[in-house]
Amino acid sequence: MNLLKTVQVALKALNKNKMRSFLTMLGIIVGVLAVVAMVSIGQGAKVSVQERISQLGSNLLFVRPGSSFRHGVHGGWGSRTTLKPEDAEAIVEECPSVEMISPEVNTRAQVVYKNKNWNPSISGTGADILAIRGWKMDAGIFFRRGDIKGAAKFCVLGKTVVENLFSDVSPIGEIIRIRQIPFTVLGVLGERGQAGGWYDQDDVILVPYTTAQKRLLGIQHINSIVVSAVSAESMSNAEQEIRELLRRRHNLADYEEDDFSIRNMADIQEAVTETAGTMTILLAGIASVSLLVGGIGIMNIMLVSVTERIREIGIRLSVGARERDILMQFLVEAVVLSLTGGLIGIIAGIIGSRVISSIAGWPTMVSVASIGLAFVFSAAVGVFFGFYPARKASKLNPIDALRYE
Amino acid sequence: MDNRVNSELIRVESLTKIYHLGEVKVVALRGVSFEVKGGDFLAIMGPSGSGKSTLMNIIGCLDRPTSGQYLLEGTEVSKLDKKQLAYIRNKKIGFVFQMFNLLPRTTAMENVELPLLYSNVPTKKRNRLAEESLALVGLAGRKMHYTHQLSGGEQQRVAIARALVNNPSIILADEPTGNVDSQSGAEIMEIFEKLNNEKKITIILVTHDLEISKFAKKMILFRDGEIVKREIIKD
């Protein structure tokens, strides 16, 4: 019998038992729905994490001094005082893959305006930090190169600081005191929001790093250097160039370890993306269990169906059906069940993931790959779980089958 | 068709069949030999358990003999594989069973078309052949009736139409009148007689009803797996 006719016969047989066929399909529908919806949640999470990280700047490198080691006691990472502003200047001048740099000096300090005070983090930066980080100004202006050279007492405030110090006046042009030293407010940073946990990116005051070094902390070194590479592709070149340059400048012998460390934003992005990918696989794995259960449902029903129709099989064999014809008849029935269930499940999965993203507010993304995978998987389930009952049917002895009551 | 008449169609030589039901050995056929010529109408008679159904199953290529020879149109059937046996069942043999064995919840037409499906006959030709076959058994007007809408006699005539549709050399009928009333039984036997006379189709009929056997031309009597009597009823 040709395939088209076999499919017609299968459809007719399934149509005779509508309720049963539907319930059998339901197992596959739920399984495929779960797979499609779960993968779309995982994919959505991955994409939104990637987006968020690339907003932070995907071509950024962070240079920090290494751990200090004195009298046999290790300090934490960044506790060395070997990183100097001159290192930063050398990096931007001598490394061709580096576009911009900003030396950073970080501290916390008490800040007073009139009768109010607050304790934000103080970040001494270079003039290029806005361009490097892709930050925007909300109002006012940022300090310039000349302000850095002169260690000017200028500052730029984050949103949270403004909210806590200035109730209704505009902060621009006002004088605030940081550790008793008066600073003129030049501008307000655009809002950046929470960055994981309790860390508020807007609870910050930016000052020229030279001002932070000399006037606030009285130090010669810097805490870190933020570097932007000319492009995302030149990240590893930039890293290499910086490493060689700093080793030379710090007079490190070949056997000595680096007295600094370089972190790469792309590495961080990769790690987080990988985590999201693992989550997708985990979710899909859990969802496939229900697809498996659906497949077992098909096998169960097909076995019942074969037993019920032993006589029919006998009749077909007696008028000249070959083993192959019987095998195909039952296999096609199982595959039709699983494929129809798969198609309905895919549609339900797409709708389901829309519903999830609108109700729970999670980003979801239904990819063509996940739909293709679900489709192929449901067909495979049909073949896999349909094969045993179909084979059982085809191996029946015609005489026994005809006599079966 | 006529060139088949009187040529040797079936030759059976010392055929035996032994069943093993667990520990018990059941001998169903003990060395049966006979031959059937094209155009014959043979009745096989005997009490139940005498081995006549076993013989029919072997002749019908549904079962294989334990030993002995079975030549169908000169071909040694016991040496064929399953696929070849299916081909013979499809093309050369038509079955009519006591229990009708029609597919339930299926129309008369679809039942008759069934053997044609397995020989890949195209749709139009399949419909035409099935209609012709149904007309031959007098059921042209019932082709769209479902199995359960037909009487026993009508169901058996659908079964005969199904057996006929692939234009087989032989029709094997196992107690074809066993489950119908005597009126329908007579009609069915008249159809067989007509097919045998007009279309020269060879018919082998199993029955234990003496009246029914009178429609046949030859008769073989079975007892305990052996032929005990051969008789020519008419020529």
Image (cartoon, coloured by chain):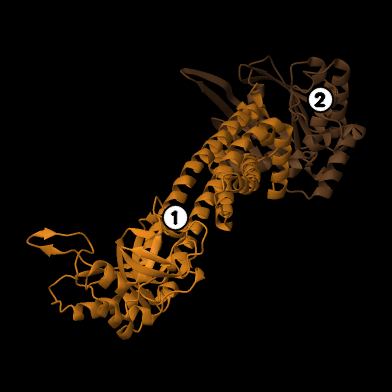
Establish if A159 lies above or below B191.
Answer: below
Tell me which residue sits at (64%, 17%) in the image: B50
Residue A395 at x, y percent in the picture: 56, 35
Residue carrying label 2: B148
Contact between marks 1 and 2 (CB within 8 A): the answer is no
Establish if A2 lies above or below A29.
Answer: below
Residue B171 at x, y percent in the picture: 76, 33
Residue extending farthest left: A71
Badge 1: chain ID: A
Instruction: Kindly indicate which chain is depicted in orange in the rendered structure.
Output: A
Instruction: Kindly indicate which chain is depicted in brown in the rendered structure.
Output: B
Q: For the C terminus of chain A, give its image quadrant.
A: top right
What's the amino acid at mark 1? Answer: Asn
In the image: residue A69, left or right of residue B213: left
What's the amino acid at mark 2? Answer: His
Badge 2: chain ID: B
In depth, the one of B189 and A70 nearer the eye is A70
Establish if A82 lies above or below A36.
Answer: below
Residue carrying label 1: A164
